[in-house]
């Protein structure tokens, strides 16, 4: 079942922070985060595994709450380059070879 | 190669025509995935391979869709008797046994 992302869209000024949420109705093994710019391929940001810790990548970090079946992506001090559509991809167990079900995306626009 | 290569980049097909979309994954990546992405939506799972074995084809929309990866490397997604609803971007991704996906740039299929 497709995870639900919120918000659907967000507009920021450069330097502002944002949080993107990803919720599933089913237990999860892992959550992946990707960013896709218009007309380009999605780019891998990070993976969070069940039982793992919060991860970070430059000023982008994420958490995974297994009990709530939720993950959140935190973007701090946003830069113009952060603009794009963010997708979470969820893996329900570790026996499916990494098969992901993606959310519908959150469109992030960072303005100067 | 350094990344996942897909060809053709764009394909216009007349309704009823057969098409073949090629994916050349990162060398050594065990897993290969095909996704369909409609405009403004997240990627939707079609099928995946682990080496040459097609382990899940539950996302293929109809029996007009067929995928293969005969030698565990290059994969081809074939669509027979294309319909207008097949118009979308077809994304291929590969990954090591566990880890994030590297996506190709996709093939934009337009059925007229």
Image: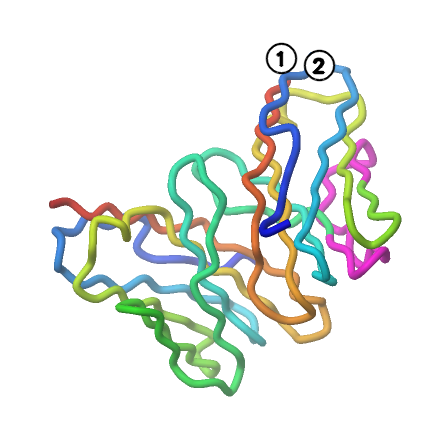
Q: Chain of mark 2?
A: B
Mark 1 belongs to chain: B
Residue tagged 1: B112
Circle 2: element type: loop
**Is B55 within the magenta?**
yes
**Disc with the residue nearer the chain's start (2 vs 1):** 2
Q: Position of residue B109 (x, y in %)?
A: 61, 26
Q: Residue at x 49, y 70 (%)?
A: A47
Compute the Cα span from label 2 to label 1.
Answer: 6 Å
How busy is the neighbourhood of tag 2: few (under 14 within 10 Å), some, or many (20 plus)?
some
**Where are the magenta residues, as a range?**
B48-66
B1 sits to left or right of A73: right
Residue designated by label 2 = B15
Q: Is residue B25 above or below residue B28?
A: above
B19 or A29, nearer to the observer: B19
CB under 8 Å between discs 2 and 1: yes
Q: Which structural element holds mark 1?
A: loop
Q: Residue furthest right?
A: B70
x then y, percent, for residue B112: 62, 12
Report whether A34 appears left or right of B65: left
Q: Determine the image quadrant of residue A6.
A: bottom left
Left or right of residue B27, residue A27 in this image: left
B96 displayed left or right of A18: right
Q: Is residue B36 above or below residue A30?
A: above
Instruction: Determine which quarter of the picture holds residue B62.
Output: top right
Q: Nearer the viewer, residue A31 or A42?
A: A42
**Residue A21: mark in rendering:** none
The location of residue A84, given as percent across then percent down, is: 33, 46
Q: Residue at x 72, y 73 (%)?
A: A95
Same chain for labels 2 and 1? Say yes or no: yes
Q: Is residue B56 magenta?
A: yes
Residue B7 at x, y percent in the picture: 66, 32
């Amino acid at each position: 079942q497709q995870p639900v992302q919120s918000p659907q869209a967000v507009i920021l000024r450069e330097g502002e922070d944002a949080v993107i949420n990803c919720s599933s109705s089913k237990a999860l093994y892992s959550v992946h985060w990707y960013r896709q710019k218009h007309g380009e391929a999605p780019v891998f940001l990070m993976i969070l595994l069940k039982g793992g810790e919060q991860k970070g990548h430059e000023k982008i970090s994420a958490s995974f709450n297994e009990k709530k079946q939720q993950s959140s992506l935190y973007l701090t001090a946003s830069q113009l380059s952060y603009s794009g559509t963010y997708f979470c991809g969820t893996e329900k167990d570790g026996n499916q070879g990494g098969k992901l079900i993606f959310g519908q995306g959150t469109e992030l626009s960072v303005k100067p | 190669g350094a990344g996942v290569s897909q060809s053709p980049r764009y394909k216009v097909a007349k309704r009823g025509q057969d098409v073949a979309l090629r994916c050349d994954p990162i060398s050594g990546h065990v897993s290969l995935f095909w996704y369909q992405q409609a405009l403004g939506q997240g990627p939707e799972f079609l099928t995946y391979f682990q080496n040459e074995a097609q382990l899940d084809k539950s996302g293929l929309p109809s029996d007009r869709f067929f995928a293969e990866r005969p030698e565990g490397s290059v994969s081809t997604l074939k669509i027979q008797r294309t319909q207008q609803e097949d118009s979308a971007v077809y994304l291929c991704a590969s990954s090591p046994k566990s880890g994030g996906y590297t996506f190709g740039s996709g093939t934009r299929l337009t059925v007229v």
